[in-house]
Image (spheres, rainbow, N blue to C red):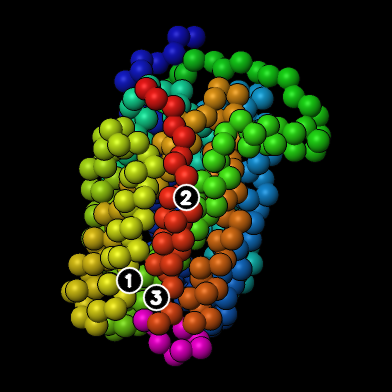
């Protein structure tokens, strides 16, 4: 069967970012965690604790499975099959959450489904990223990665807006099911264009069996790509910083400025919009400057704006600086993806992106733990959030030690 046109491949690939941000935005960041705490958990403290354990379990599971899946995909070919399979899995598991009774009797079933769905979501993203070098010429990797990320933020905005419209004036007990079903349907419908796109087949490769083969394969990757270890350590640090900001910005706004959930969601939408504009605006700049320069500029901006934002005491100043920081959230993530796509060979694409996932999840607990410990010790939300900027500063200095190598195009 003939592959789809290059234009269709790019558009359908970018639209997958639109499809999958509903899960990250609605189910694991903004809305469902609060509903889980209110309707499934016996009390708010237990709810926050159990949700934290669920997120940690899914991160550990994804980190352990990612290297194995990456190697398997590079040997078997056809990353599209794995994108489709894992997306269908997490959409089905999310739908199952919506079908369960909304009561404390469903507590542990919901936790199990969320852990499995979140792990499948992360594994689908590895396969999705591995398609990027297949559809983009080297000189266009940055812009296509950026356009995908920007579409993802736009999709996240619209899915949040749809959720606000759906839940307004409705009975509270019906909200968890409504959000879960909306997320499942949004994901399934908007992931279809990519699932129906045809790509040129990739060759299958022989591999050394068992654990020795996995270890040898990844040793070879690190030997071939000088500077990869340094990049992954920096990626680990700034991903921890971003994950901590995402996890605590809503709680911080609600506590510091006494905001109701509806206003927190409105400001979250503003920040999503800023992040999407940043990803779109820096897409071509990545191709001109190179990924490394965009990442380092973004890290400096994130460190400065997050530090100033936490230091101010007025709501509108906080929102202004938070939106300025958000402008650089999209570019730093998109350029990290395009950097890996640039250095990837045909035989190690999925493995390189699986290493990114492993790096991003291996210490996902670290940032939240530091914020929680300092907040508890100081009794101040502002003091607790101040160390977040140190993750970005540390990542910048690691990347600045030696120039990252990227192929010329």
Given residues 345 and 226, the one toward you in this image is 226
Circle 2 sits in a helix, a strand or a loop, which is it? loop
Secondary structure found at label 1: helix
Measured from the top left, where is residue 118 in percent x and y?
A: 55, 53
Q: Quadrant of residue 309?
A: bottom left
> Is residue 278 part of the magenta span, yes or no?
no
Question: Do residues under tags 1 and 3 come within 8 Å of each other at their CB atoms?
Answer: yes
Badge 2 local density, few (<14 within 10 Å), some, or many (20+)?
few
| Mark found first going from the N terminus, 1 or 3 | 1
Pointer 2 residue = 401
User: Residue 189: x and y, percent?
Assistant: 40, 38
Labelled disc at residue 307: 1
Q: Residue at x 62, y 27 (%)?
A: 74
Which residue was labeled with disc 3? 386
Tell me the distance, in whole angstroms, between the alpha carbons under discs 3 and 2.
25 Å
Q: Earlier in the sequence, mark 3 or mark 2?
A: 3
Q: Are marks 1 and 2 in contact (CB under 8 Å)?
A: no
Toward the viewer: 156 or 409? 409
Which region is colored magenta? 375-382
- For numbered disc 3, what is the local secondary structure? loop
Q: Badge 3: how crowded within 10 Å, few (<14), some, or many (20+)? A: some
Outermost residue on the front side: it is: 401
Q: Residue at x 65, y 53 (%)?
A: 61
Majority secondary structure of magenta residues: helix
**First of labels 1, 2 by sequence position:** 1
């Amino acid at each position: 069967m003939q592959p789809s046109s290059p234009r269709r491949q790019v558009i359908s690939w970018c639209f997958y970012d639109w499809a999958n941000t509903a899960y990250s935005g609605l189910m694991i960041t903004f809305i469902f965690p609060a509903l889980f705490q209110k309707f499934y958990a016996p009390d708010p403290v237990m709810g926050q604790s159990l949700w934290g354990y669920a997120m940690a379990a899914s991160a550990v599971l994804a980190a352990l499975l990612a290297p194995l899946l990456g190697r398997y995909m590079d040997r078997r070919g056809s990353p599209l099959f794995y994108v489709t399979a894992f997306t269908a899995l997490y959409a089905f598991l999310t739908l199952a959450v919506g079908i369960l009774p909304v009561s404390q009797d469903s507590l542990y079933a919901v936790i199990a489904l969320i852990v499995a769905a979140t792990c499948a979501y992360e594994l689908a993203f590895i396969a999705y990223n591995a398609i990027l070098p297949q559809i983009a010429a080297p000189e266009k990797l940055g812009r296509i990665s950026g356009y995908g990320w920007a579409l993802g933020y736009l999709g996240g905005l619209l899915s949040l807006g749809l959720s606000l419209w759906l839940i307004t004036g409705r009975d509270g007990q019906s909200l968890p099911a409504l959000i879960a079903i909306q997320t499942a349907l949004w994901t399934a419908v908007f992931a279809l264009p990519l699932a129906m796109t045809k790509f040129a087949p990739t060759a299958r490769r022989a591999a050394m069996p068992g654990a020795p083969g996995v270890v040898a394969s990844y040793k070879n990757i690190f030997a071939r790509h000088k500077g990869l270890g340094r990049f992954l350590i920096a990626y680990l640090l700034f991903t921890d910083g971003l994950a901590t900001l995402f996890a605590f910005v809503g709680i911080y706004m609600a506590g510091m400025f006494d905001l109701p959930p509806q206003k927190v969601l409105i400001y979250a939408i503003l920040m999503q919009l800023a992040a999407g504009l940043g990803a779109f605006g820096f897409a071509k700049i990545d191709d001109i400057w190179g990924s490394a320069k965009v990442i380092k500029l973004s890290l400096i901006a994130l460190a400065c704006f997050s530090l100033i934002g936490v230091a101010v005491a007025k709501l509108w100043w906080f929102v202004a600086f938070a939106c300025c920081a958000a402008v650089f959230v999209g570019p730093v993530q998109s350029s990290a993806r395009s950097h890996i796509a640039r250095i990837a060979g045909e035989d190690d694409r999925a493995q390189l992106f699986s290493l990114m996932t492993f790096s991003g999840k291996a210490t996902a607990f670290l940032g939240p733990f530091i914020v929680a410990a300092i907040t508890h010790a100081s009794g101040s939300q502002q003091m607790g959030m101040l160390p977040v900027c140190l993750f970005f500063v540390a990542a910048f200095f690691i990347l600045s030690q030696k120039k990252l190598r990227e192929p010329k195009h």
